Image (cartoon, helix red, strand yellow):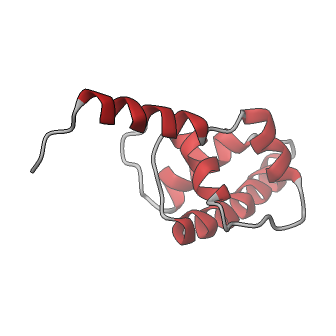
Amino acid sequence: MTKKRRSDQLEDIIDIQDQSIMLSEVESIASSTEEKDNKDGLYSSILLSLTHETYPKNKAKLFWAEIIEDMKNLEHALGRKVGISVATLDYLSNIKKYWMNPK
């Protein structure tokens, strides 16, 4: 295993920050009925912004569709709007069991 140089680590941080999306933008995308183009890793960037974890493009696109469906189910069950952050946490923790101890 090779050790990363400090400059390489800084570039990684910059790359991740450049991919971040504001929560208001994510909420807007979540409420839209049209599917967005994933060629540039849109769903990976969205999930990175929400979870601070990286996901491959195809997995991120699948997760996103399922998170949106879970959000709709939660809203129907609760009779009120549920934010995308809550839906993401619910989906990854309770539905997928992907996160056992989220922070």
Which percent across, then down, holds residue 68? 73, 59
Indicate the quadrant containing the C terminus: top left, top right, bottom left or bottom right.
top left
Residue at the image position 52 percent from the left and 42 percent from the top: 51
Query: Taking 37 as reference, is 13 above or below it?
Result: above
Quarter of the rendering containing residue 86: top right
| Residue 65 seen | yes
Which percent across, then down, holds residue 11? 41, 35
Q: Nearer the viewer, residue 98 or 2?
A: 2
Residue 25 is left or right of residue 88, and the answer is right
Q: In this figure, what is the number of numbered marks?
A: 0
Residue at the image position 60 percent from the left and 49 percent from the top: 45
Query: Taking 35 as reference, is 88 above or below it?
Result: above
Q: Nearer the viewer, residue 43 or 2?
A: 2
Quarter of the rendering containing residue 12: top left
Q: Nearer the viewer, residue 82 or 50?
A: 50
Residue at the image position 38 percent from the left and 29 percent from the top: 10
Which percent across, then down, holds residue 72? 79, 58
| Residue 82 seen | no
Quarter of the rendering containing residue 19: top right
Query: Taking 55 as reference, is 17 above or below it?
Result: above
Residue 76 is left or right of residue 67, and the answer is right
Residue at the image position 14 percent from the left and 40 percent from the top: 3
- What is the residue that sits farthest to the left in this orientation? 1
Which percent across, then down, holds residue 34? 89, 66
Residue 12 is left or right of residue 70, and the answer is left
